Image: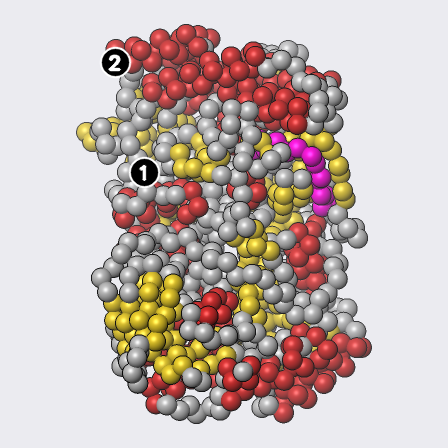
Amino acid sequence: MSASRLHHPSIRASGRPIRFWYDGQPVDSLEGETIAAALSAAGIAQMRHTRSGERRGLYCGMGACFDCLVTVDGRASQRACLTKASDGAQVRSAMPAGTADDPLEPLVPEAHEAAEVIETELLVVGAGPAGLSAALAAAQAGVHVIVLDERPQSGGQFFKPLAPSHAAATPTDTQFAQGLALARAVQEAGVRVIQEAQVWAAFSAQEVGAVIGGRATTVRCRQLVIAPGAYERPAPFPGWTLPGVMTTGAAQTLARAYRVSPGQRIVIAGNGPLNLQLAVELIGGGAQVLAVLESAPRPSLRHARDLARAARNAPDLLLQGWRYLRQLRAHGVPVLWGQAVTGVEGAERVARVHTAALDAVGQPCGTARSFDADTLCVGYGFVPSTELARMLGCEHRVAPRHLGHPATVTREDGATGIEGVYVVGDGADLGGSRVALARGTLAGAAAARALGKTPPDTTDARRQLQRAAEFQQALWSLYAPPPVRLAELPDDTVLCRCEEVRFGDVRAQIRAGRDTLAAIKRNTRLGMGRCQGRYCAITAARLVQEMTGRAPEAEQYFAPRPPAKPVPAGALGFEKPEWGGHKPAITPNLARPVEGGALPAMQADVLVIGGGVLGACMAYYLSLAGQDVLVVDRDDLNLQASGANAGSLHVQLLSFDFGAKAQAGGGPAAATLPLGPLSVRLWQEIERDTGEDLEIKVTGGLMVADSEAGMRFLQAKVALERSYGIEAHLLDAEELRRLSPALSESLLGAELCPMEGKINPLRATYAVAAQATKRGARFVRGCNVTAIERLPGDGAGFLVQTSRGPIRAGRVVNASGAWSSTVGDMLGVRIPVKGAPLQMIVTEPAPPLVDHLIAHADRHLSLKQAATGGLIIGGGWTAAFHEGMRLNRAERDSIEGSLWVARQVLPAVSGLHMIRCWAGMNVNIDGAPILGDVPGVPGFYNAVTSNGYTLAPISARLVTDLIVHGRTDVDLTPFRIDRFL
């Protein structure tokens, strides 16, 4: 048996020996164990390749970090920690090339015509202690219960049953026994437990989206219990991304479930008794543990009261902890109190672990120490998995423990402010397994009562909850670590594991004033990877707090977006009815300002209202012309429509801007055509002027057709566009195939518009604003305009009242996008602009598939491949405003319809995961912008356009020329507000 296989007198290997291939090398395994367990047993630590060429290994061990991704038989991005090994499988660390010889194989079987629908009285998400106890309590009251769980087996992170690769005649410890007993009781109560079911979204209290057996499933329920558990909190230090560094939970899963040691020479570090348990389990199986480092100081007489409280409420757990310490001492494993890891070194994996004692404020002090080790297990506590609860709009608060984290606000029984929704266990807030069991029971009973059932008496559960909560508080006091301080971490330490964003990158953004998580995300890509911010968001929030002194608020964390975890895109695509044009909606105030204090009275030659891309471009051109310009926004720069933009540079007409679907007969949109090429060239000039890479790629746009009617549509559209001076060509199927071979063979042809392309909207707006700032432009955030008064006398200007104080301005430019009509109302000017919430989708990074901007003649589609490799999929699919959350949210029908169209055009989409879906506010006019001055209101100008990112530079340039010179080189007649008067 391998030296990495742990032994136990009561546990035997029961899975048959199998062999698979990893990067061309044979790996022996046991049927029933995961690929990660087999690789660890073989001493292989390297798995995923990062964009920069670094390697990652097993880290979280529970499918949350996405660092252990491998390709299995052509199926990309499979989590090795959850994917079972199979005999003869070809496993590799790199993604397929996406070519005919090395395709991205579909991740799931071809989707049916619609998602399967399952109905139940109570749906429980998560089969850990909280979820199982909730299901049992409700089922005992006669409720029909379904439990969905992502793992291969019930039990969650705490119970961790033996994998099918091993067997034991009887449970080997109390923890195993309790977990098996609870799972058996749930089964006997008639609960339907579905394992390996991925819940990817909660759309309402009665509707949850899941993928079960590779098939999209909509679960409809009358009551919902969310019990997703927690994941281990990040603890960054130099080298923490090296293969061989993993969480304590990952190592414990290897040891308890698969009987595999995580390495040969192991150091364990962190905070709390779970690290002691892991060390004992490893040495009991024959592994070598060099030391256990505990960041809290050694308990002493000053902890007598806490020790007594712990002993009173859970004497068995306190005794267990004492036994762990005794066993470690007997095996010569030192427990080093008040010490922590300061860094890790190694080439292909961990080779050396550096440690130091901590002083009272959490900083290294005293003599440093090093260990020659190949594995470091770190466990510094947990973070609740609040994704689904936040997606539903449940109230959250910031819990201050460790780095701080969002925690769901609930009553004792887990009830939230949303009727019929309960959140329990460590997925709501941290409390340990016994608190989770008790709260789960109370939630199940409460759900049963809401359904008109009579649950068993819960007096004992409430008593257990009180005792468990008391014990947990005492335990935290006993293990109270020094405060976390990030200031001393070197700038080159990785903060975001997925996107390789370093502390220095984030510090630079904060110093530049981009000091919100949203702004940092847009400027660095922090939180945009597959883990969706789980292992960087709370660290970044803490860093912002340290550098600004501003305490975080729950709504300042990343907005809750589906999917909860990356989900196979091919499973979710279903054909939906097409519709004509954008659907106008209300345009409420979505701002969440972090600044709002009163400012001294301000003055400017030109006041620009709106800090999106148009406002930034106005500042750019006005400052270039020597104007004193002030830009105000009620939120932050680039946060609404501009910051949620997909970054297409459109030159040809969109499918719904031509023909029967077009607004106002298509005339206004057609009149706008000459502006597109001019604006794209201005973007190229801006890129050169800023000296930044805005990822502008003018590779051409393809509007494809899959029917003869679609080809006739394109033929007529090309003729119109050429009449306006747009270069456009009609391609047949063979020409299209040569130009873009990854597109579907079912396509009959396409229109090629060579001037189209793409830009990174997350960088461009900030780069333009920064350049304008260098030229003297000023930007003020958190500044909501509440009233505008025209001052008496020619050229006297305006007095503008704002939430931060008055502003005197000679001229005012309305660049507030979907909110422009509100600004116009302040001056009695009717501006016919409405908002249109739209959604976009991005996949995981893929190999090169398409160079062009792709659209469809008959369908809503905008598809392009970003510089990072992800496919950005849009095209005008409707999102919806959630009043309680003050947030535009993606809709299930739109997600499904958008992915179906994308898959028909680019089949490789079926081989990728959707990692993020977001919504932004589009501007809805009549197909043309509104530019220029307003009759009867001298000094007031509009700069509003529905094709905002493409047309921002030309729109701003024209309005600037009008302000500065009183004329423009382009006839503004088709774009003036006069056409509506």
Local SS, label 1: strand
Residue position marked by numbered label 2 in the rendering:
302
- Residue 204 sits above or below residue 194 on the image: below
Residue 130: image quadrant is: top right
Q: Depth check: give the residue in front, 89 or 592.
A: 592
Q: How far from the left and from the top, in percent, is residue 880?
A: 60, 55
Q: Which residue is rendered at x = 59% and y = 15% of the image?
A: 458
Q: Which residues are magenta?
A: 215-228
Q: Type of residue at label 1?
A: Gly
Local SS, label 2: helix
* Mark identifier at residue 343: 1
Q: Which residue is rendered at x = 47% and y = 61% of the image?
A: 640
**Residue 45 in magenta?**
no
Q: How far from the left and from the top, in percent, is residue 480?
A: 32, 24
Q: How far from the left and from the top, in percent, is residue 798?
A: 32, 75
Q: Depth check: give the residue in front, 374 or 927.
A: 927
